[in-house]
Image (cartoon, helix red, strand yellow):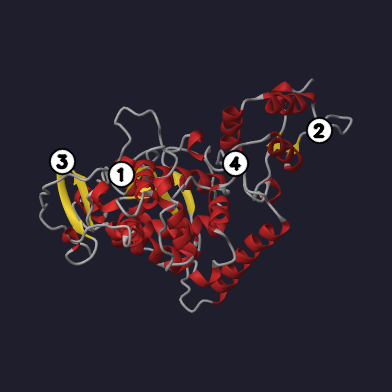
Amino acid sequence: VVTPPVSRGRAVEPKVDLVLRPADVQPGSSARYGDDALGAHRGRVEVTTSLKQRIEQLRQVLYRDAQTSTDQVETDFEDMVIKVRRGAHIVDDTLEAMGAWGPARWRQGVVVHFEGEQGVDCGALTREWAKILCQQLLRPGRGLFRRTARGNRVVVLADQESELAHGESTEGIYCFLGRFIAFALWRGIRIDALFTPHLFRLMLDPHAKATHEDLREVDTKLHANLHMMLTSDHETLEETFLMTFCIDTEYLGVRSTYDLIPGGSEIPVTGENVHSFVDLYVQHVLYKFNERAIRAFLSGFHSLIPPDKMPMFTPVELEAVLCGQPTVSEDDVEELRQASHCSLDEAGKPHVQVLWFWAIMRQLPVDLRSMVLQFVTGNERPPLTGFQNLEHPFTVQVGVHLRPT
C-alpha cells in the first residue's frame, strides 16, 4: 500500500512535466463513453479458425467445470430473475439483487426484467442490461474509472480517488465488476469494456508488469516526456531534467510527492539509472496507485475464469472477444443477412420488403448500421465469431397489415 507523504518543496523545478493528474480531458469535452468513436483506434481482429476453436474451447471448459463444481447451488427460475430500472439506477438495482452472489450463483445465469416494460428475456434483454450496466459502471462520474485523454479507453482510478468519491472502500464493487466481466466473456455477451492493454494482460496473467508502452494509451503527454528522458544524452541527463526518484501527483488542487524507492527524493535521475526510474514510475502510475482496486477486480474475474484457463488468448484477442469488432463492415451486413430468417411470399421467395430492408442496410453509414445492430442484437458491435452463433437468429418479416389481401 502506498501512503502519500507531505509534499516536499524543491529548490529547482524539473524541466519536464511529470505530474500525475486525475485526467487531462476537459469538462466540456464532447467525448462520451459508449460512443462508436471509442473503438476507432483499434483495428479489426482477423478471425481465424484457430481463434474460433479457442473461444469455443474456453466456454466448453468453463461449462464443464461449472457442472462438476463442488460449490453448486440450487436455484429456481424466480431466483434467477432480477428487476432493474434503466439509466443510472441500474447499478444500484443490480448490486442490490446480485451484490452478494458468489461464483457458484453467477454460474447459474440471470434473467433480466426491466421495470415498467413487458419484454420477455430470451437473451436480448440480458445483453441490453449488460451493455447499460457496463456503461454506467465505467462512466467517469461513477467514481471508479477515468477516461484517457483521447477518450478511447478507461483507466482504474487511484485507490485514494475512488474511496474518496464513494466515502468507503470500493474493493467490493471492483470485485463485482470483475465477476460481471467474466460472466459476459463466458456467455458471449459483448460489452464496451475498453480497458487499458495492461489490465487485459493482467486478466490473462496476474503477474504481468506494466511497460512504458502501456502508458501511451493512458497518458500520451506523460509517455512522451518519459520517452524524451530515455532518448536524451545520458551524459547530461541529470543537469537537463533535474529529476529525482519520486513522483508528484495533483488531486483536488493538492500536490503530493511519493518516493519511488526509499529516500527517492534525494536520489537524482542520471544516465545510468534512468531506465530504472522510468520502470518504477510506470509501475506506480499503472499499478501501485490503484493496486487494491485492480487486485479486487482480478479476484472477481478469476473466481469465474481462473488464470490457467486464459493463456490461450493474446490481450488483443481477449479485448476483441469481449468487446466485438469495432465497426460494422459491409461483410458484416452480408453475414447477418445470411444468418437471419425472413418471411416468404406465396412463391416461397423472400418478400420484396425484406429485400428492401437489406438493400437499405448496405447503404447506411457505419454509425446507423451500428444503431440497427444494437436494436436487433442488443449490441452495436459485430460479434467476433460472426452472427451464425447468435442464440436467437435475427428475423425480418412482413407484418400482417402489409401483406396483400
Q: What amino acid is found at the position of numbered circle 1 in the picture?
A: Arg
**Residue beneath the point at 16% across and 51% down:** 256
Q: Is residue 239 above or below residue 350?
A: below
Q: Position of residue 288 (x, y in %)?
A: 29, 60
Alpha carbon separation for disc pair 4 and 3? 45 Å
Which residue is label 1 attached to? 142
Q: Position of residue 220 (x, y in %)?
A: 39, 42
Q: Is residue 244 left or right of residue 352?
A: left
Which of the two discs, 4 and 1, labels the residue nearer the N terminus?
Answer: 1
**Tags 4 and 3 touching, CB below 8 Å:** no
**Tags 1 and 3 touching, CB below 8 Å:** no
Which residue is label 2 attached to? 344
Q: Looking at the image, is mark 4 or mark 3 nearer the viewer?
A: 3
Alpha carbon separation for disc pair 4 and 2? 22 Å
Which of the two discs, 1 and 3, labels the residue nearer the N terminus?
Answer: 1
Disc ID at residue 377: 4
